[in-house]
Image (cartoon, rainbow, N blue to C red):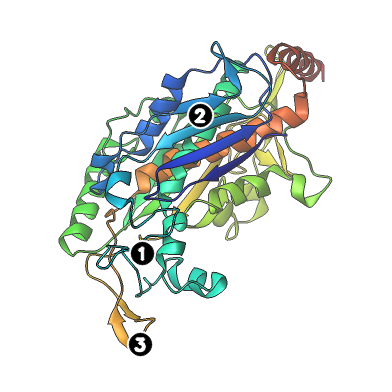
Amino acid sequence: MIRFLTAGESHGPELVVIVEGLPAGLAIDAARIDHDLHRRQQGYGRGARMQIEDDRARIVSGVRHGESLGSPVAIRIANRDWPRWEAAMSAAPVEGEGTDLRRVDRPRPGHADLAGGMKYDRADLRDVLERASARETAARAAAGALCRSLLSVFGLEVRSHVVQVGRVAVPDPLGVPWDRINAIPDGSPLGCADPEIEKQMVAEVDRARTQRDSVNGAFQVVAKGVPAGLGSHVQWDRRLDGRLLQALGSIPAVKAAEIGAGVEGASRFGSEFHDEIFYDGAARRFYRTTNRAGGIEGGMTNGEEVRATGYMKPLSTLPRPLRSVDLRTHLPSEAAFERTDTTAIRAAGIVGEAMVCIVLAEAMREKFGGDSVGEMRRNFEAYRERLRAY
């Protein structure tokens, strides 16, 4: 089983992630991790924080001479903004009159501020928002990069594309082919596979910025080369679609997720929705000419591309604050303002890739086991031969 834990606050000294369950002998390249960390920081509509941070992975355990050891891999990612927050985020008590502790008393609608303050009995909401911040997803991106390296050994690739920003949407996201998604350059403003639609998306972000507002949309994550049979139908918590939906739904600001054309399927007849099955005798494989199931049937992968979409609400920190209440006086007040983005939809797609990589890597480990990459590969090849003979 692959497990990961993250730690760290948005303006603390660093983020930490520990990934357990990677087999021994996996090639680990810190530059590949840094590449995904860099991709997470890109996208039109990002704020000033992205101009400060230059995220780099410092591997501190579990890797020797470029290969995993089979023990937990720990990675540290420094926060470059920390020197300006040492007093406000100090782990030790801070004394001194006039010390800037950057207290937050006015909760932002839509954020974790008020709910977390009530749950943990914190009068200063910074105790909540620092961990609830999407800055935590940098650690997820690092964990996902490790899992991406494992998936690549078996020919699995994972990419994302933005399919909606505000009122501008790609007409048929499931119909966008892998080659176009894979060809999206890292420098693309919003990571849309259609340059003309992307221009309209950029204009939508500009409208939100002009109005001192926020806007988000939807991203789709696509996994290619996934073998049939990952996941299981036998218990609710082993169903791969449920695990993917939970993984995407855990990304900050994602309020809905679907597999394939799941939402659309609610308004279709079965004869219009389900993907008919065919057989290619030369290739000795079953295939489908449509993929409305998103590559998963009965909680298991069916050999087609896995496609999952996350829907992201507008960001809750607004330059033009919404109405709120001051916790000290209980009187009406404007919500607090923290540095923010106009949109983070492109970054959310990269984090979505990371989460899908983690879930698929865990499913591969469950299916093929092995303490080393070599043992896992032998199990995988034997299974693939059995599928050809089926």
Residue 129 image point, x, y percent:
42, 61
Q: Earlier in the sequence, mark 1 or mark 2?
A: 2
Task: From this view, report whether residue 121 is shown above or below residue 183.
Answer: below
**Camera sees residue 306:** no
In the image: residue 346, left or right of residue 236: left
Pointers 1 and 2 in contact (C-beta within 8 Å): no
* Front position in the image: 9 or 187: 9
Tell me the residue that label 1 is attached to: 316
Q: Secondary structure at mark 3?
A: loop
Tag in front: 3 or 1: 3
* Front position in the image: 85 or 97: 97
Tell me the residue that label 2 is attached to: 145
* Front position in the image: 276 or 15: 15
Residue at (66% x, 29% y) in the render: 303
How far apart are labels 2 and 3 at the CA level? 46 Å
**Residue 273 tag number:** none
> Could you tell me the amino acid type at mark 1?
Ser
Residue that sits furthest to the front in the current view: 96
Tell me the residue that label 3 is attached to: 329
Residue 205 image point, x, y percent:
24, 53
